[in-house]
Each structure stands twice: as C-alpha cells, then as structure tokens.
Amino acid sequence: MEECAPPGCLIELCIQLSMIMLGKQLIQNNVFEVLIPYMYRTIQEEKVKKRAAENEENDTEEKRPKQQYDKDYALEPFEGVTPEYMEMIIQYGFVSLFVASFPLAPAFALLNNVIEIRLDAAKFVTEIRRPDAVRCKDIGIWYNILCGISKFSVITNAFVISFTSEFVPRMVYQYMYSVNGTMNGYTEHSLSYFNVSNFAPGSAPTTTLITGVSMCRYKDYRDPPWDPDAYTFSKQYWSVLAAKLAFVIFFQNFAMFLSMLVAWMIPDVPRSLREQLKKENMMLMEFLLNQDQEARWQREGEDYPD
C-alpha cells in the first residue's frame, strides 16, 4: 500500500470521501431502497394473481371482494428499523470522522437526508407491511453509539489536520524559523538535498531533461549529504512532529471543552420543566402522605379532619 507523500494526502482522502458520499450514500442506498421493495411487491403480486386464478377455477362459490389484508400480503414484511439506523450511523461516521478533509460532506449528507426522508416515507406507506407499534423511551443503544462516534471523531479530525495537511509545518516555520514572521522561504525550508551520486544501483533515472545535475531537492526534513548523519531526520523534522502531537492534544481538549460548554448552556431538560417536575413530585408526596394519614385515622375509628 502506497504511503502518503511528505506534503500529505489530504486531496486523495477528499476524493475518496466524495466518491463514497456521492456514489454509495446518495445513489446506491437510495436506488436499492426503491428498487428492492418494488421488485418484491411485483413478484408477490404476480404470485397472488396466479394463485387466485387457480382457486377461481376450482371454486364455484361467489367471488368475494379483495380485502386490505389480501393487498398487504403482497408487500414486503417489516424487518425492523435497524437497517435504517445503521445507514444513518454510517453516514454520520463519514461526516464527523473526516469532515476536516472533506468539508462538503455535511452538505451532501443534508441532500441525502432530504431524499431519504421522502423515499422512506413512500417505502413505509406503500411498499412495506404495516409494522406493529411499540412504545419506546428513546433511540436506545444508538444514542451511545452516536456519542462514541462524536468523541472519536474529535481525535480523528485532530490527526487528519495535523498529519495530512501542511497546517502545522507552516505554523512551525512561521513562528520558529522565519526571519520576519512570514511564510517567505517556506518552500526552501521544507526541501532537503540529495546527491545524485548516492542513487542505489539501478534506481537512478535512465533519461534526464537536464544534464550536469549533482544535487536534487525533495520534500522532506532530512540532513544534507555533506552532514555526518546524512539523510537522517533533521532537527526540523522532530520539531514539526512534536508540534503535530501538541496540536492533537490541544485540539482534542479544546473540542471537548466546547462540547461540555454547549451541553451546559443547552440542557436536555429546560429549567422551567425541571421546576414543574419538582412541583409535581412534591404534590404527589403530599397526596400520598394525606392518604396514609386518612387510612390511619379510619383504622383508629376517628374522623379525619378536612
């Protein structure tokens, strides 16, 4: 497997994610959600018609009108909402885990969800048998899965920004190695020297456009060939690596702090509702206490005061 080049592989990751979001999520899933139930219903209707025609030949009684359950029998049976939840979880994973490398992912996810809502509505109403209603408090284990993906996406995006882009190397050069605090000379700083005489046998290019070249430049942080430790990682490489790891730690803690701040500012239960729940619990306790006192007075044969 080919590794990322020193400048990073953000463009390749962006192209791959765009193909996944457009090809798989937007086209493949929606097409299959429409075609498979339609094909199943068509096949079942043909079987029902064929069976009904055979029964009519053998049955001499009066033909009864087709009931709704006869029509629903040709529909696809309801298999639960797990595939629907799984599809949304996968989409949320793509959007949250790699949003730093593909900023258009939320826009494509929104477009996919708009289409998904209409297709699912048509599928559940016309292509699937009516499901049994079940009371539930919330989405269950899927909420914990979403929370886990959200926390893991912070770490993933931190590593994507740090190790697949030039954001951190540029910041290191600007604040540590630049003479005037600008990006002038960054390209020269990020290139290393290579002596063409150090090519391994058989690895040198056979044809060159320029003759008489003794030194080449390539994208990496390594010591020059005239250094005693030629072609080993230079001090700049370790400085950039340390800055990348520091950025990962800072980004993770900053994102977690923001999420905790937003969760504190926007609670799950509003303050007014919490007060009403406390009042309701207090009234319930008073009612139960009065009922207990009234029952005790009645057992003792005394009248309970109003």
Image: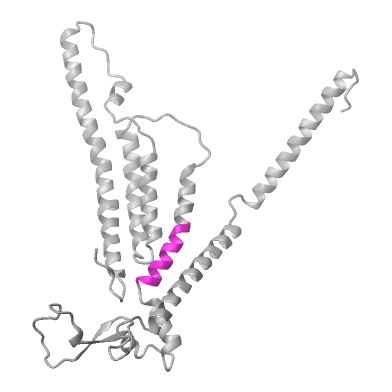
The residue lying toward the viewer, choosing from 304 and 63, is 304
Residue 156 colored magenta? Answer: yes
Which span is picked out in magenta? 151-164
Q: Residue at x 39, y 30 (%)?
A: 131
The residue lying toward the viewer, choosing from 43 and 59, is 43
Q: Residue furthest front?
A: 228
The residue lying toward the viewer, choosing from 285 and 210, is 210
**Is 7 situated above or below 123?**
below
Residue 49 in sight in this render:
yes
**Is 148 situated above or below 12?**
above
The residue lying toward the viewer, choosing from 15 and 173, is 173
Q: Residue at x 78, y 35 (%)?
A: 286
Q: Residue at x 39, y 59 (%)?
A: 97
- Horizontal side of 263 relative to 271 (left or right) equals left
Q: Residue furthest right?
A: 302
Location of residue 175 in the rendering, given as x and y in whole percent from the top left corner: 45, 86
Location of residue 14 in the rendering, given as x and y in whole percent from the top left corner: 30, 65
Location of residue 37 in the rendering, given as x and y in whole percent from the top left corner: 26, 36
**Is 227 situated above or below 71?**
below
Residue 139 in sight in this render:
no
Residue 65 colored magenta? Answer: no
Q: Residue at x 35, y 71 (%)?
A: 164
Figure quadrant of the N terminus: bottom left
